[in-house]
Amino acid sequence: MKLCTIISVVCFDFLFLSLLFVQGQEPAKKKYPKVETRKPSGKEKHDPRKLVEDSKVGIAMLDQEAAKGVLSAKSNGVELAIKLKAVPNKKFTDIEVAWTITYSGPRPPLIIVQPSLKLTTMATTITIYAAAKGKDYALPFLVSSPWEDSSLTEDFDYVIDAYGEKKPLPKRPPIHSLLDPDRFKIRTRTKEWFITVPAGKSAQGVLTVSGEKLQEFARKYYPGEFDWKHSPRLFVQVSHSPWDRGVDFNFDAWVGEFLISYNAVPDLPK
């Protein structure tokens, strides 16, 4: 019994010590249900019928929420506002989410991790709800900021992009201990993550969701649900949860969370 207790304490100490070396990697807690719609890794099997049933969101609820026209969220003097736009390209229509951040708090300038689907901030998530013509429910598709996946068994780390694709980073020096602080550093973390908003000014940018990727996902995971002769109705939910204060860059960045729920995208031309 004593031996079991000693082993348990030692295991806990190793876990606790390893967490001490994780610098700034504590994402803000979400206050909304997480939609698990990333592409399964490897050869993981999925049941399309079960996935559809588990993922359905009533179109009546989406219409009701979208009618409120709430396109911004504010927290502690920081406001995030969005505008939605359908942008046709040669074969598909992309979805643009234009964002604006303003600050009215007492400590300008504002320094904050910017919304992004390209930087590995793990801070931004866009959920698209697509409703096929004639159906009373919509199905979700999630895109989010890329993130690093550190391998414990390989000399490579990976970046998982906004659509779940895995890309290796350049080979790194071998890690000889699980407690090595370099094991947990985000290699792609840079000052570009952060933007500065002076008093009385605003920062702006655009997040683009690929219409081609949206259709690829729907064909694979929701087969038979959409008639591609007719464009689906789309609703968008945007969350942004900057968690990094940028201490390593001598910043004192703002941390918190925003959630802008269920707004309709203008009708798609194709």
Image (tube, rainbow, N blue to C red):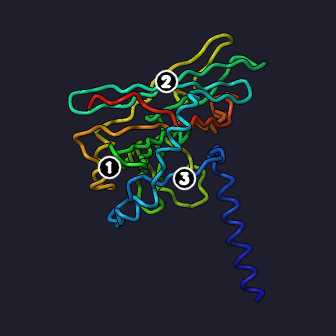
| Mark 3 vs mark 2, CA separation in Å | 39 Å
N-term mark: 1 or 3: 3
| Mark 2 vs mark 1, CA separation in Å | 24 Å
10 Å neighbourhood of mark 3: few (<14), some, or many (≥20)? many
Determine whether label 1 and label 3 are within 8 Å by CB: no
As displayed, is residue 151 above or below residue 164? Answer: below
Residue 242 or 62: which is nearer the viewer?
62
Residue indicated by mark 3: 183
Q: Position of residue 246 (x, y in %)?
A: 64, 33
Q: Amino acid at mark 3?
A: Arg
| Quarter location, residue 74 | top right
N-term mark: 2 or 1: 2
User: Left or right of 217: which side holds 6?
Assistant: right
Residue 37 or 231: which is nearer the viewer?
231
Residue 192 or 34: which is nearer the viewer?
34
10 Å neighbourhood of mark 2: few (<14), some, or many (≥20)? some
N-term mark: 3 or 2: 2
As displayed, is residue 215 above or below residue 12? Answer: above
Residue indicated by mark 2: 83
Where residue 218 is drawn, which disc sits there? 1
Where residue 230 is drawn, which disc sits there? none
Query: How many numbered callouts?
Result: 3
Which residue appears at 70% of the width and 30% of the height? 75
Q: Amino acid at mark 2?
A: Lys
Determine whether label 2 and label 1 are within 8 Å by CB: no
Which residue appears at 48% of the width and 45% of the height? 147
User: Left or right of 245: which side holds 216?
Assistant: left
